Image (spheres, grey):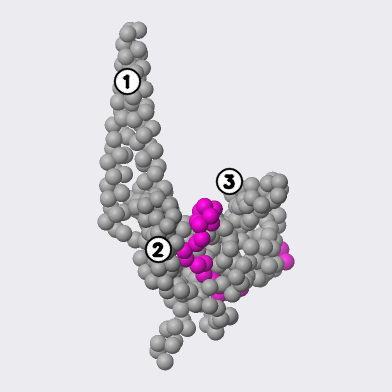
């Protein structure tokens, strides 16, 4: 069981407005613009996002960070080319307060499509603080990594499954180096997803997945049978078989697309390829996410791109010892 380092808060920050106030602002903002469906989604997004953020406030957890080359990264070819890794344990707290630096609340990645669509975010980003000084071993011995405050936020991705994109960043002002693996001295972004638990909804999704999976098995069997029959058929039989094969292939592709969407959107406990971890207050996290750095592209260098520099995993959520001591006293 991990335990946080006790001590006073580093910085006093403005308090986040209550959900009721945010709801009033949202209703006023959406009453005169957009379609009914869009207003409904914005309302659900605001309430759901605030629900996730409220459930997370003061939550503390341990993260295992693994810096190194991963498939699909856009980092230069010589970066971490040896396959070496730089790993360390990082403990953080997701705070209820706003970040101490207002500029931190403008990060587009954390604001998500709300910002990209020109919509003002309905829920403010909040502060995330490091609780320890991570260390790793290099050829020069034990090295300490300096980490400073960042911010976190979430965005509704699926209304039906209550899936949210969960993202946060921390600043690494001095970076870290181990062999040819360099954690750049800059802002590092952590990207993952989570759900608000709803077991009946998840069970229905799993049942739907199982039914589709059985249909896929049946269609594949029909395709194999038709392929075998077509080998002994005449020209007319082959032409008829081609039409039937086209229909079966289209059906197979449709089922596969539905299965993929269910896997992507729901935490299917029986069939998921993702490892999941229970968080505080009925939040369910995908255990592993990616870490990235931001780069600018385009003629004016205004287009943001995020290059993967490794992975991280949620190891454990734990209690705030400061609060426990306050209750005991």
- For residue 100: magenta? no
The residue closer to the viewer here, 249 or 287, is 249
Q: Earlier in the sequence, mark 3 or mark 2?
A: 2
Q: Quadrant of residue 213?
A: top left
In the image, the segment drawn in magenta is 112-140
* Helix, strand or loop at mark 2: helix
Specify the farthest residue to the front.
Answer: 32
Q: Please state the horizontal and vertical placement of residue 94, each as a whole percent of the image.
A: 50, 71
204 lies left or right of 139: left
Q: Please state the horizontal and vertical placement of residue 294, each as a whole percent of the image.
A: 64, 55
Residue name at image x 67 percent, y 63 percent: 186
Q: Earlier in the sequence, mark 3 or mark 1?
A: 3
**Marker count (numbered):** 3
Q: Residues within 10 Å of mark 1 (few under 14, many from 20)?
A: some
Which residue is denoted by mark 1 in the rendering? 244
Which residue is denoted by mark 3 in the rendering? 71
Q: Which label is found at residue 63?
A: none
Q: Is residue 28 above or below residue 232?
A: below
Compute the Cα span from label 2 to label 1.
52 Å
Residue name at image x 46 percent, y 58 percent: 155
The residue closer to the viewer here, 146 or 125, is 125
Q: Residues within 10 Å of mark 2 (few under 14, many from 20)?
A: few
Q: Earlier in the sequence, mark 2 or mark 1?
A: 2
The quadrant in which the N terminus is found is bottom left
Which residue is denoted by mark 2 in the rendering? 27
Q: Quadrant of residue 55?
A: bottom left
Compute the Cα span from label 3 to label 1.
39 Å
- For residue 133: magenta? yes
Residue 134: tell me if it is visible. no
The quadrant in which the C terminus is found is bottom left
């Amino acid at each position: 069981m991990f335990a946080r380092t006790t001590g006073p808060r580093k910085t006093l920050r403005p308090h986040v407005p209550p959900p009721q106030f945010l709801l009033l602002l949202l209703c006023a903002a959406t009453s005169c613009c957009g379609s009914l469906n869009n207003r409904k989604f914005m309302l659900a997004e605001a309430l759901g996002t605030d629900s996730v953020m409220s459930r997370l406030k003061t939550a503390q957890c341990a993260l295992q960070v693994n810096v190194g080359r991963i498939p699909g990264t856009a980092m230069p070819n010589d970066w971490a080319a040896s396959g070496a890794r730089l790993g360390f344990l990082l403990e953080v707290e997701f705070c209820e307060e706003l970040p101490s630096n207002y500029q931190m609340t403008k990060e587009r990645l954390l604001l998500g499509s709300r910002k990209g669509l020109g919509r003002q975010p309905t829920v403010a980003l909040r502060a995330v603080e490091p609780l320890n000084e991570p260390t790793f071993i290099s050829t020069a011995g034990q090295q300490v990594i300096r980490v400073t405050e960042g911010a976190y936020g979430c965005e509704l991705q699926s209304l039906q499954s209550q899936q949210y994109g969960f993202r946060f960043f921390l600043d690494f002002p001095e970076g870290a180096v181990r062999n040819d693996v360099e954690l750049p001295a800059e802002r590092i972004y952590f990207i993952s997803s989570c759900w608000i638990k709803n077991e009946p909804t998840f069970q229905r999704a799993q049942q739907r997945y199982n039914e589709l999976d059985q249909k896929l098995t049946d269609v594949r069997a029909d395709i194999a049978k038709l392929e075998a029959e077509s080998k002994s058929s005449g020209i007319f039989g082959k032409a008829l078989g081609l039409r039937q094969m086209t229909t079966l292939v289209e059906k197979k592709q449709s089922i596969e697309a539905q299965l993929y969407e269910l896997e992507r959107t729901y935490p299917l406990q029986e069939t998921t390829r993702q490892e999941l971890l229970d968080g505080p207050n009925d939040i369910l996290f995908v255990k592993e996410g990616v870490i990235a750095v931001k780069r600018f592209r385009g003629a004016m260098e205004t287009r943001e791109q995020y290059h993967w520099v490794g992975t991280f995993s949620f190891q454990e959520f734990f209690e705030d010892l400061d609060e426990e001591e306050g209750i005991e006293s």
